[in-house]
Image: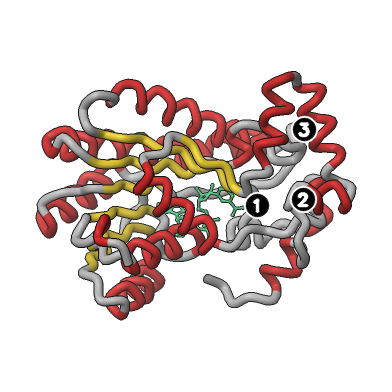
């Protein structure tokens, strides 16, 4: 443990499972005090116990981030209990798989916007005055590799993740100089429940043999990014090749995405390292 996070107050949305739970446990392992938010009170209570077992003080506040009143109550509860917020991790979100021609596509975009973008905006707007008053703090926004390069059948998700990237970029520049940092995290496919409902055949071709990151890998990167004052983190690092290709030209980006459907290429880029997404999530307990 490093003293850097000792007694710092970290608020994590979407902390009931997956990446949010792992982020909460990682900060607890660093000695931080935690505020946990998500809708399911029972799962949140389990994570609260896990955090407490690591010796950290913790407050869990069942919250739907799409409710303005619930978000206000969350931030008020955090400041009433701890008096400050040092790190806000905007992680709560959902994801839908489906092509642009599907009848439900626009509705998928709307639902994902509500949970993953407008929830993030609301929590940020509510917490920012606290950080401004302190003159310090870090806001971590969970985006995705698809926040910089969309894949087929992930249009609704990629639209929203691009919006999260843009929101993070604007926010970072607006708060610069006030002691507040903003970091956007762009993980590739991660082994959580997010896409568990999607059949393997529904996944975009490059994803079918991809080995997912673990939530713990993402959580470690979040902790390191906050400590080092990073602006953007792409996971795994080799995914930057894809993003670099996309920045050069969409033709190059699409070529790299197509090349990733070949297992040897995916292996060289560190994207295929063993079990596929479905093999991984089917063999692990739901967390
Ligand atoms: N898994 C991936 O491949 C991947 C890759 C890149 C980025 N991400 C991003 O990482 C974040 C976490 O995803 P995950 O993979 O850990 O998914 P997950 O296991 O499904 O967890 C999502 C979390 O968000 C919470 N949540 C969803 N809607 C909410 C709402 N309206 N209000 C409050 N909490 C809400 C869920 O809790 P409740 O259901 O209890 O509310 C849960 O704690 C998401 O923003 C996702 O876009 C995921």
Question: In the drawing, what numbered circle is on residue 207?
Answer: 2
Quadrant in the picture for residue 72? top left
Q: Is residue 171 above or below residue 13?
A: above
Is the distance from the Cβ of mark 1 to the nearest ligand 1 atom less than 8 Å? Answer: yes
Quadrant containing the N terminus in the rendered view: bottom left
Q: CA distance from mark 2 to mark 3?
A: 20 Å
Q: To which residue does mark 1 refer?
A: 189
Colouring mode (rainbow / by chain / secondary structure / one colour): secondary structure
The residue most toward the bottom is: 53
**Number of residues whose C-alpha sits closer than 10 Å to that of mark 1, classed few (under 14), some (14–19) or many (20 or more):** many
Q: Secondary structure at mark 3?
A: loop
Return the x and y of residue 96 as percentages of the image width and height: 63, 47
Q: CA distance from mark 1 to mark 3?
A: 23 Å
Return the x and y of residue 236 as percentages of the image width and height: 63, 49
Q: To which residue does mark 3 refer?
A: 101
Which residue lies at the image location 69% right of the left edge and 46% below the top edge? 97
Q: Secondary structure at mark 1?
A: loop
Q: Earlier in the sequence, mark 2 or mark 3?
A: 3
């Amino acid at each position: 443990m490093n003293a850097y996070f000792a007694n710092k107050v970290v608020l994590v949305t979407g902390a009931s499972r997956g990446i949010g739970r792992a982020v909460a446990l990682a900060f607890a392992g660093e000695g931080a005090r935690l505020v946990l938010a998500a809708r399911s009170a029972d799962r949140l209570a389990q994570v609260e116990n896990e955090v407490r077992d690591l010796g950290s003080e913790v407050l869990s506040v069942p919250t739907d981030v799409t409710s303005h009143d619930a978000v206000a109550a969350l931030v008020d509860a955090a400041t009433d209990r701890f008096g400050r917020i040092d790190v806000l991790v905007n992680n709560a979100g959902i994801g839908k798989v489906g092509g642009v021609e599907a009848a439900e596509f626009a509705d998928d975009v709307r639902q994902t916007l509500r949970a993953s973008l407008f929830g993030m905006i609301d929590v940020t707007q509510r917490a920012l005055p606290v950080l401004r008053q302190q003159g310090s703090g870090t806001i971590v926004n969970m985006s995705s590799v698809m926040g910089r390069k969309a894949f087929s059948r992930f249009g609704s998700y990629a639209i929203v993740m691009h919006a999260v990237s843009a929101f993070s970029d604007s926010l970072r520049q607006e708060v610069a100089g006030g002691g507040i940092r903003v970091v956007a995290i762009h993980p590739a496919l991660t082994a959580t429940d997010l896409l568990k409902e999607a059949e393997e055949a529904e996944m975009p071709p490059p994803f079918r043999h991809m080995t997912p990151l673990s939530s713990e890998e993402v959580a470690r990167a979040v902790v390191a990014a906050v400590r080092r004052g990073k602006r953007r983190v792409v996971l795994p690092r080799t995914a930057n090749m894809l993003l670099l290709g996309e920045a050069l030209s969409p033709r190059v980006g699409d070529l790299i995405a197509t090349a990733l459907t070949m297992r040897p290429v995916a292996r060289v880029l560190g994207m295929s390292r063993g079990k596929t997404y479905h093999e991984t999530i089917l063999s692990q307990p739901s967390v």
